[in-house]
Amino acid sequence: MARSKIALIGSGMIGGTLAHLASLKELGDVVMFDIAEGTPQGKALDISQSGPVEGFDAHLSGANDYAAIEGADVCIVTAGVPRKPGMSRDDLLGINLKVMEQVGAGIAKYAPNAFVICITNPLDAMVWALQKFSGLPKAKVVGMAGVLDSARFRAFLAEEFKVSVEDVTAFVLGGHGDTMVPLTRYSTVAGIPLTDLVKMGWCSKERLEEIVQRTRDGGAEIVGLLKTGSAYYAPAASAIQMAESYLKDKKRVLPCAANLKGEYGLKDMYVGVPCVIGADGIERVIEIDLASDEKAQFEKSVSAVKGLMEACVEIAPKLK
Ligand code: APR
C-alpha cells in the first residue's frame, strides 16, 4: 500500500515541527508548501537528512506551487502570520483571512478529498472561512485548538499535583481565545474529577482557578517569552494527533473546532467541542449537558467567535 501524503500549507515554525513529527511517526510522505522561496525546500531537505539517524522512511519535499499538494490525504494549514507580544489572536484576522482565501482555492483545486486541519489564528473564524473558501465537506475541515488547550491544562495540572501527565485528562470547550471554557468537573486525574480533588484537599478552589486562568493565557505567556512569534512545539504535536486519528481511523475523542449542525443550539459555525475523528473526518460531535455557569461561559465564548465571523464577512462579503 502506498504511503499517505501529508501536505503542510505553511512551512514556518509550526510547519517545520509538523514535518519533523510526521516523519518521526512515519505517518506518510510530506510535502511542505510556502510562499517563501527556499524555506519549504530547505526544511524538507534538512528533515529528510535526519531520517537515516532516526531510522524513519518518509519522503519529504518542498514547493512554492500548489500543484505539489495534488492528491494529499491530509492538509495541515499554518499559512499566515503569528502573534507578537501585545497582540491578541484576533489582531491577525485581516491578514490571515486573505491567506485562507488563497489556501482554500489551492486545496479545492489539488486536494479536494483531503482531511484539512487548520491551525492559523484566530482559529475558529479562520477554519470557518477556510471551509467556505474551499467548499470541502464540513466534516473534512476542522480546527486545531482544543487538543492544545487541553494539553496546556494537563501539563499545568500534572505539575501542580506531581502526577504523570498521562493520568491527567482535561476537557476544554469553546473558542480558542481568552474566553475558552476549561471544564473542571470533566477534567480528571485517573478518572477522579478535579472538583472531587478539591474536596479531597489536593488543591484549593482558588489555586484551581489560577491554573484555569493560566490555561486561558497559555498562548500569550509563550508569546511574551519568545517575543518574535508564538508557540509551535505543542500546536504541532496537537495537530499531528488529530491527523493520526484520521489516517489510522483511530476514532480518538478529541476537542476540536468543528462545524456545528444544531449541536449546542448552534448552526453553521465552528467552535471547540468534543469530537470523534476517524476515517470519515469528524464522525461525531459529542453534546454534553452544561451546568448554568458553564453554559454562560460557553455562550460568551460563542459570541466572541460570532463577532470574529462578522468581522470576516465585512472584509469578504461572499462568506455570508
Ligand atoms: N500562503 C502560504 N504560506 C504563507 C502565506 C500564504 N499566503 N502567507 C504567509 N505564509 C507562510 C509564511 O511564509 C511562513 O513561513 O506561513 C508561514 C507561517 O509561519 P510562521 O510565521 O513561523 O508562523 P507559525 O508560528 O508557524 O504560526 C502560523 O499558526 O498558531 C497559528 O497564530 C499562529 O496564525 C499563526 C499560524
Image (spheres, rainbow, N blue to C red):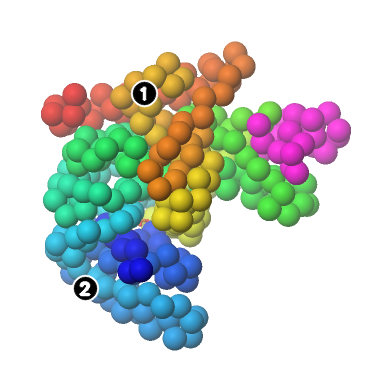
- Say which quarter of the image contains residue 260: top left
Q: CA distance from mark 1 to mark 2?
A: 42 Å
Point out residue 210 in the picture as x, y percentages from the top left corner. 66, 36
The residue lying at 47 percent from left, 71 percent from top is 24
Question: Magenta residues?
Answer: 186-211
Q: Is residue 72 magenta?
A: no
* Above or below for 306 versus 138: above
Q: Residue at x 21, y 53 (%)?
A: 111
Q: Quadrant of the N terminus?
A: bottom left
Which residue is most to the bottom? 52
Q: Which residue is nearer to you in this view: 85 or 247?
A: 247
Q: Quadrant of residue 216?
A: top right
The image shows residue 233 at horizontal and vertical percentages of 48, 59
Image quadrant for the C terminus?
Answer: top left
Decide if residue 166 is in sight here.
yes
- The amino acid on which the numbered mark 1 sits, given as a three-letter code, is Lys
The residue that disc 2 covers is 38
**Count of numbered circles in the view:** 2
The relative height of residue 129 versus residue 28 in the rendered view (above or below) is: above
